[in-house]
Amino acid sequence: MFADIYRNKNIFVTGHTGFKGSWLCAWLISMGAQVTGYSLGVPTRPANFDALGLDQKMHNIEGDVRDGEKLAQALKQAQPDFVFHLAAQALVRDSYADPVTTFQTNMMGVLNILEAGRHCESIKAMVIITSDKCYRNDEWVWGYRETDRLGGSDPYSASKGCAEIIAHSYFDSFYKQGAACATVRAGNVIGGGDWANDRIVPDCARAWASGKPALIRSPGATRPWQHVLEPLSGYLWLGAILHDNDYGCGFSPRGQAYNFGPPADVNNPVSELVASLARFWPGFTSVSDPDGCGAKKECTLLKLCCDKALAHLDWKATLNFEETVRYTAEWYARYYATGATPDMWDFTQGQIAAYANAAQNRGLKWTN
């Protein structure tokens, strides 16, 4: 996979204890990479990081991305070939409760990793992960393109728009030579091992594992749901292309932004996702919680246009909606049946292998 570029490479991942970060580390380790992670600590209990035993499989550094000096020192010691920056305050509703921390983490985190990175000569490629919510959401029925206006009416979305502006100012000012960098945007990611608050799949898993109905805030809201491995495959493929300066597409991705998401026809309501998940938990249901959002605004319609990733990187999503739900539900079912044992590492690696095989069977370029 990915032209075997990650084997024996040093990789630095911020936010490695989070949901997406832990899946990324698991995939990198399976490819023979030496991974160093930098994060505030394990954000939830349970957590995918613990379930997979990642503390025994990689170098784990506890630190705050707002601490520029400590982050720079950790980067210097790791001497990475690649950097994947995922560390963030990633919840919309939490951003209302603590907007200052949200802005500081999401803006200064990007600033600090880019400032430290430009003084670390070992780095060949940097992938800065932001969010689909970096776009100013006008509730369009078509997907947002990378050139659309950035912004956000909630603190989380606004902080991600700011992070994009910071990143691209650094690309233009300091990264035209040396390490090749790009930003990536994805959202509505589901998969096993997510236990964050106020996310629909973790809310269902927690409730149903306890024998309770799940409370659903916005059953009619639609989202382009995708499995966590989908955007990660895009991040990894983009990193590989940046590292090798392999611009066979005729266009350099250096300094660019890319959306990663499912096809345009994947845009299912929350109620359908919950009903599909419930098939794996027979007898359990959900109930509407219309007051759950209170006065906190959350978008009801948001999707991305991923044509640029297809045109420049020859990347597109692998799984359909049913496969995405099945991968997700089977992971939770296995976890609640066995607990955080070595079995979960093997099961997760099995899902990664199955996903890669499906991508290969569908002729996706990154599988070569």
Image (cartoon, rainbow, N blue to C red):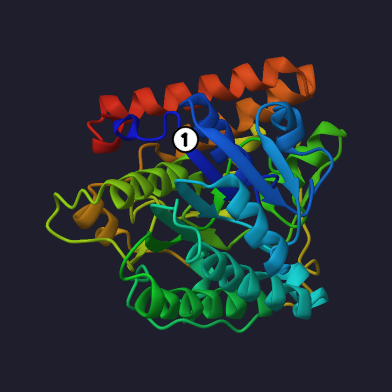
In which quadrant of the rendered image does the C terminus lie? top left
Seen in the picture, residue 208 relative to 313 is either above or below; the reply is: above
**Residue pointed to by mark 1:** 322
Write the residue at 64% across / 35% down. Answer: 192
Residue 37 visible here: yes
Query: Relative to 136, is 282 above or below?
Result: above
Q: How many badges with numbers are in the image?
A: 1
Report whether 44 appears left or right of 36. Answer: right
Q: Which residue is pictured at 65% across the width and 32% down the height?
A: 58
The answer to whether residue 297 shows anywhere in this view is: no
Q: Categorize mark 1 by other alpha carbons within 10 Å: few (<14), some (14-19), many (20+).
A: few
Identify the residue at horizontal 65%, vertical 45% (top origin): 37
Q: Look at the numbered disc 1 and give the secondary structure of its residue.
A: helix
Tell whether 105 sits left or right of 346. right
Relative to residue 43, is residue 7 drawn left or right? left
In the image, 265 versus 116, the foreground residue is 116
Q: Quadrant of residue 91?
A: bottom right
Say which amino acid is labelled 1.
Glu
Question: What is the quadrant of the N terminus in the image?
Answer: top left
Q: Relative to the observer, which residue lies in front, 17 or 77?
A: 77
In the image shown, does 124 or 232 lie closer to the viewer?
124
Q: Position of residue 133 (x, y in %)?
A: 53, 70
What percent of the width, then of the height, locates residue 172? 35, 78
| Location of residue 342 in the rendering, given as x and y in whole percent from the top left corner | 72, 16
